[in-house]
Image (tube, rainbow, N blue to C red):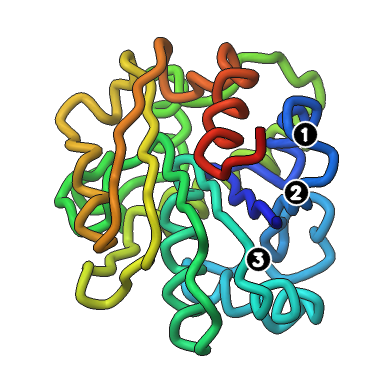
């Protein structure tokens, strides 16, 4: 069994590194790193979700072999949910088997008209970073390196714009598997969202699971989230 993790806006493959200690050692955990980010900073940064996923297919020869086996699940948090959605859309388009489970965390379904910003093309980088800081939607640790902070903020703003612009409907993509939608009860971004909306993207079951906490609720509940994953994948 392979479990693909997709990062939140401004995140990286390392965002899920601490999850591994709560997951079975025989589970093949793959944390996806987008072009132009962190460990792949030598590659160009792309500016739309579709291109980010296409580039992952083009640059990873082993990906097609893993997908052909059909024994895989996908976890995405926040922007990671739209990356996960586009990942499966392209998977199905290429004729690979459907995933066995989708874990979609911290964001409403992409056909729901609910956004952080009205017209994302008119919003400045400073407005984006201030919005995320004000709503406690970034990690709180202090980073003393000003250049690194600037790099992280550039990535964050690029990612937010990509996620805000991404639209796909249930007619365009069906996951073909059970879905677990997860959120934090104090997540201000989701106060008007209906996480049951993810059920429109599958003809299988969709269960909504709530944890206490805000947008990054899982920092307090990593072990419980991993137990949920294991239970749904029947890895216990």
Disc 2 or 3, which lies upstream in sequence?
Answer: 2
Residue at the spot of label 3: 45
Left or right: 64 with respect to 229? right
Pinpoint residue 111: horizontal percent, then vertical percent.
Answer: 20, 59
The location of residue 21, given as percent across then percent down, is: 80, 27
**Which residue is labeled 2 in the image?**
29
Mark 2 and mark 1 residues within 8 Å of each other at the beta carbon: yes
| Left or right of 112, for residue 226 | right
The quarter of the rendered structure image containing the C terminus is top right
Name which quarter of the figure residue 150 lies in.
top right
Q: Residue at x 66, y 52 (%)?
A: 3
Report the front residue among 1 and 109: 1
SS of the residue under disc 1: helix
Please identify the quarter of the rendering in which residue 195 is found: top left
Residue topped by disc 1: 20
- Disc 3 vs disc 1: Cβ atoms closer than 8 Å? no
Q: Nearer the viewer, residue 117 or 32?
A: 32
Look at the image and tell me in which quarter the N terminus lies. bottom right
Of circles 2 and 3, which is in front? 2
Relative height, residue 185 to residue 159 (above, below): above
- The mark that comes first in sequence, 2 or 1, is 1
**The quadrant where residue 45 appears:** bottom right
- Residue 82 seen anywhere in this rendered image of the structure: yes
What distance separates the C-alpha of mark 2 from that of mark 1?
7 Å
């Amino acid at each position: 069994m392979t479990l693909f993790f997709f990062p939140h806006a401004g995140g990286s493959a390392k965002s899920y590194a601490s999850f591994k200690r709560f997951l079975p050692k025989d589970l093949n955990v793959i944390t996806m790193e987008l072009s132009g980010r962190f460990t792949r900073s030598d590659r160009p940064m792309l500016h739309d979700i579709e291109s980010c996923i296409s580039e992952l297919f083009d640059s990873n020869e082993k990906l097609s072999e893993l997908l052909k086996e059909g024994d895989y699940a996908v976890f995405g948090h926040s922007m990671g949910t739209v990356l996960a959605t586009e990942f499966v859309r392209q998977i199905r388009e290429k004729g690979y088997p459907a995933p066995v489970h989708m874990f979609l965390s911290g964001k409403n379904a992409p056909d729901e008209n609910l956004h952080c910003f009205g017209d994302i093309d008119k919003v400045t980088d400073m407005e984006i970073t201030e919005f995320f800081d004000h709503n406690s939607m970034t990690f709180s640790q202090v980073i003393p390196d000003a250049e690194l902070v600037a790099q992280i903020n550039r990535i964050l703003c690029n990612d937010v714009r990509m996620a805000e612009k991404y639209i796909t409907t249930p007619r365009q993509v069906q996951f073909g598997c059970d879905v677990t939608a997860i959120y934090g009860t104090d997540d201000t971004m989701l106060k008007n969202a209906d996480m049951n909306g993810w059920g429109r993207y599958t003809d299988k079951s969709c269960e909504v699971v709530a944890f206490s906490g805000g947008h990054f609720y899982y920092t307090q509940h990593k072990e419980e989230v991993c137990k949920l994953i294991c239970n749904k994948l029947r890895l216990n």
